[in-house]
Amino acid sequence: MRAQDFVTEALSTVRLGPQLFAPHPKELGNKDSSIVAETFALKPRARRWTSSAKQTANGITSAWVKWALENMPGWIGNEGILFDVAPSTKILAINSDRDAVSAAAQYGVEIKNIMDLFQKMPWQAIARDYDAVHYDGTNRSNDMYMSSWDVESTAWFDTAGLTNPRRVSIDRLGPKPTAQPTEKKPRFMPRRRR
């Protein structure tokens, strides 16, 4: 797919509800756990990654927690940190490859094809103008570049907008399965002889 096939659109921001930071269990008590030292080729360098929190009967969960429990269960502990998001926080929404191309163009980066995003996405420039970047995860199967953001998540460049931190229990059990009605199997009836 060529970037020229995309129409550059205006960038949009999003407001978020409570966010869950679910660090690796070894990092929960670490004062430096807010800084992610790695720079992923497809993702921005962020001070913190969160995902939108959802209350369950067993604690708090998020799209990230569900993904990690299924794919990397050792990455999720029993506790996380729940934050509120200050209304004044400026969060850029990038929910598709089209949005990523528009963001790159806004910052003067010429994208000739989607593959260019893998090397030229201007995350540092975006970080100067926005507190965070949010991906809603709804378009993942249709995108090449943004599909690397496995699930709904937010990369925080400036964590000042994350307020009211509190430790919470992570729901490691998931939803309780609902009882499935048992299907009555037809009894075998021998054929009558004529």
Image (cartoon, rainbow, N blue to C red):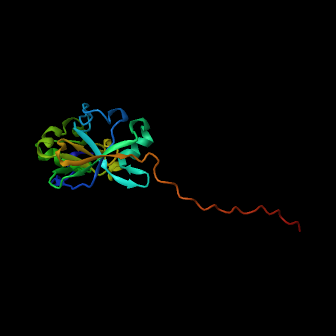
Quarter occupied by residue 78: top left
> Closest to the observer: 110 or 52?
52
- Asked if residue 146 lies left or right of residue 109, the reply is right
Q: Position of residue 133 (x, y in %)?
A: 21, 46
Q: Residue furthest bottom?
A: 194
150, 103: nearer the viewer: 150
Image-based side of 192 in relation to 115, left or right = right
* Above or below, comparing residue 33 to residue 164 in the picture: above
Q: Which residue is at 29% across, 52% downward?
A: 136
Assign the N terminus to one quadrant of the image: top left
Asked whether the viewer can see residue 100, the reply is no
* Residue 2 position by quadrant: top left
The quarter of the rendered structure image containing the C terminus is: bottom right
Q: Nearer the viewer, residue 166 or 27?
A: 166
How many numbered marks does the figure carry? 0
Task: Work out which residue is located at the far right of the displayed protein and give it.
Answer: 194
Q: Residue at x 86, y 66 (%)?
A: 192
What percent of the width, then of the height, locates residue 35?
Answer: 23, 34
- Residue 50 percent coordinates (x, y): 28, 45
Q: Nearer the viewer, residue 158 or 149?
A: 158
Q: Residue at x 43, y 55 (%)?
A: 57
Q: Is residue 106 left or right of residue 49?
A: left
List x then y, in percent, for residue 94: 23, 49
Q: Residue at x 17, y 47 (%)?
A: 103
> From the viewer's perspective, is 31 left or right of 126?
right
> In which quarter of the view is residue 147 placed?
top left
Is any part of residue 66 visible from this angle? yes
